[in-house]
Each structure stands twice: as structure tokens, then as C-alpha cells.
Image (tube, rainbow, N blue to C red):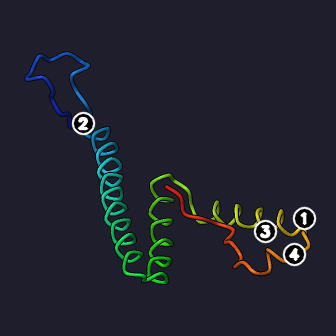
């Protein structure tokens, strides 16, 4: 087994990290750092699009941002689908008659992208 010696050769058992442990830790951390960097860039782009009144493009970018956040948090598409299904079931089981005020306002989306 390959090992990496830390602390300049003291030789203590606790000074060694196996190559397998190092390989397991590094890619995940590095991958998360990359995703976080990408997320920050995407959010800056979304802000710029909103400032330019490119609402549709900003909304499409919000979907990409949601996807990256899901990857960072370890949420897969099956979890998201289950959440959406539950929200639709809940919304369908409690029908509320539309009031005059609700009819005049655009419908709010069921899901929102939050920081």
C-alpha cells in the first residue's frame, strides 16, 4: 500500500495517510470547490441578466443554478421529483376558490430557487 508521509518523517503511525484515503478525500473536496466556484459565476451571470431585463434567460439560468446546488447538497432528481409530486398532491387536495385579487395577479410558481 502506498502511503504519504506527513510532518517530515517522524514515523508515527498517525502521520501516514494511505493513498486510498487521500484519493477518496481529494476529488470530492476538489469537485465541491469547483461546483461552488461555478455556482458563484452562474449567480453573477443571473444578476447581470436580471439587470439587463433578460428575465427569460435569467429564469433558465436559475434552473441550472438549482441543478448545481442539488449536486452540492447530494440531492438527486428522484428526490426533487418526489418533492414536486408531494407539493402537487398537497395543492390538489386543498382547492381554494380563486378570489378576484388572485385572478388579477399572475400565478406564483410552486418551486423557488433560494440561496
Seen at 14% across and 17% down, the residue is 11
Q: Is residue 94 above or below residue 49?
A: above
| Vertical side of 3 occupied by 84: above or below | below
For the residue pair 43 and 9, the one nearer the viewer reads as 43
Q: Which residue is mark 1?
A: 94
CA neighbours of label 2 inside 10 A, class few (<14), some (14 to 19), many (20+): few
Query: Helix or strand or loop: what does disc 3 sit on?
Result: helix
Q: Nearer the viewer, mark 1 or mark 2?
A: 1
Residue 87 against residue 104 in the figure, above or below: above
Disc on the earlier residue, 3 or 4: 3
Which label's residue is closer to the chain start, 1 or 2? 2
Q: Nearer the viewer, residue 73 or 58?
A: 58
- How many other residues sit within 10 Å of disc 3, few (<14), some (14-19) or many (≥20)? few
| Secondary-structure class at tag 2 | loop
Q: Position of residue 18 (x, y in %)?
A: 27, 34
Q: Give the alpha-carbon distance from disc 1 to disc 4, as whole Å.
A: 12 Å
Q: How far across and down, in percent of the image, does residue 112 sit? A: 60, 65
Classify residue 10 as left or right of residue 36: left
Q: CA distance from mark 1 to mark 2?
A: 61 Å
Return the residue at label 3. 88
**x, y (%) of residue 29?**
33, 47
Residue corresponding to mark 2: 1
Q: Which comes before the other along the chain, label 4 or label 2? A: 2
**In which quadrant of the rendered view does residue 102 lie?**
bottom right
* For discs 3 and 4, the disc positioned in front in the rendered view: 4
Report how far apart the C-alphas of labels 4 and 2 lie in the structure: 68 Å
Amino acid at each position: 500500500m502506498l502511503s504519504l508521509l506527513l510532518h517530515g518523517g517522524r514515523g508515527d503511525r498517525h502521520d501516514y495517510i494511505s493513498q486510498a484515503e487521500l484519493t477518496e478525500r481529494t476529488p470530492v473536496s476538489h469537485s465541491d470547490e469547483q461546483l461552488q466556484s461555478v455556482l458563484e459565476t452562474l449567480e453573477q451571470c443571473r444578476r447581470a441578466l436580471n439587470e439587463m431585463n433578460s428575465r427569460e434567460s435569467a429564469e433558465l439560468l436559475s434552473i441550472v443554478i438549482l441543478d448545481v446546488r442539488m449536486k452540492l447538497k447530494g440531492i438527486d432528481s428522484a428526490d426533487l421529483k418526489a418533492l414536486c409530486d408531494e407539493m402537487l398532491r398537497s395543492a390538489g387536495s386543498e382547492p381554494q376558490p380563486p378570489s378576484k385579487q388572485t385572478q388579477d395577479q399572475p400565478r406564483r410558481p410552486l418551486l423557488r430557487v433560494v440561496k
